[in-house]
Amino acid sequence: MAVTAAQVKELREKTGAGMLDCKNALTASDGDMEKALDWLREKGIAKSIKKASRIAAEGLSKVVVDGNKASIVEINSETDFVAKNDMFLALLDTCAKTILAGCPKTNEEALALPVEGQTLNDLFINATATIGEKIVLRRFAVVEKADDEIFGDYTHMGGTKTCIVVLKGGDADLAHYMAMQVASMNPTYVSAADMPAEVVEHERKVQTEIVKNDEKFAGKPEQVINGAIEGKVSKSLKEMCLVDQEYFMDTAKKVSAVLKENNAEVKSFVRYGVGEGLEKREENFAEEVAKQIGA
């Protein structure tokens, strides 16, 4: 019987297998969804399905630069050991280069990009099945610059942290140092001018509650309390802004001063710290050993 596109889509959503594999499974099973599921499992293609609920919060990130474009990607695995696997490293490299060439907007678009007769998603499924851990594309960005701007990038410990900076003015060394600054100090914005009003308001509410609950301000005049709140808000917001941070190469200077000395300006940056914001898997070594020896 003829296999419909809707059937292929349904099987793909259930299994995460590639479109062609799903079509072949349905064709071999005369369109029977359950038999097609078994067909994929028997072929080893659906091994990754069982791993869908596992926590993938380790991994690596990578920056690739080509002319006026750059890509930065983060791929997650379940353990940091797997992130050293040659197949994982090859996938990371292929993923970064494919995304740079294809300029997708979403993860779905990225995973649909063609790679030597397959899709990027097929490569992730094959890696998960072969390596034996859940391997996922967490996030990516494609960054562009003008001809008179400079890319600065930095990779820490093989990709546990990466950063790409767009610098106008200055030179390649300064651009690299700015990327190191962002990677190590983790600012959220270039300057206060980039900070949304709701972020400022949220921080003011948080600091207000902190001061109200601080016993040392009990019974203090309202003017003193308000001054303390504004002081805390200002300090916190400055830590979020790159130009207001202490420069890691010379802590006596602010980043803004270093940029001014070099007639330079940071236009934008993207920073990835692998696993940030993700739940980490908790290992129980005793239980793991017991499982291995069948206790």
Image (spheres, rainbow, N blue to C red):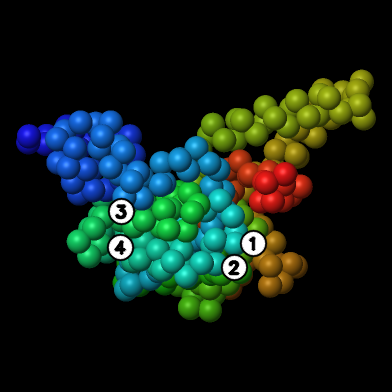
Comes first in the chain, label 3 or label 4:
4
Report, in whole angstroms, how far the alpha carbon at label 3 lies from the one at label 4. 13 Å
- Residue at disc 2, secondary structure: strand
- State yes or no: discs 3 and 1 in contact (Cβ < 8 Å): no
User: Image quadrant of residue 226?
Assistant: top right
Instruction: Name which residue lies at 53% across and 41% down.
Output: 54
Report, in whole angstroms, how far the alpha carbon at label 2 lies from the one at label 4. 22 Å
Residue 37, numbered circle: none
Residue 192 % position (x, y): 56, 47
- The quadrant the N terminus occupies is top left
Residue 122, numbered circle: 3
Mark 4 lies on residue: 98
- Residue at disc 1, secondary structure: helix
Query: Could you classify mark 1 by the number of other residues whose Cα lies within 10 Å: few (under 14), some (14-19), or many (20 or more)?
Result: some
Residue 194 % position (x, y): 49, 46
Hey, what amino acid is under mark 4?
Thr
- The quadrant the C terminus occupies is top right
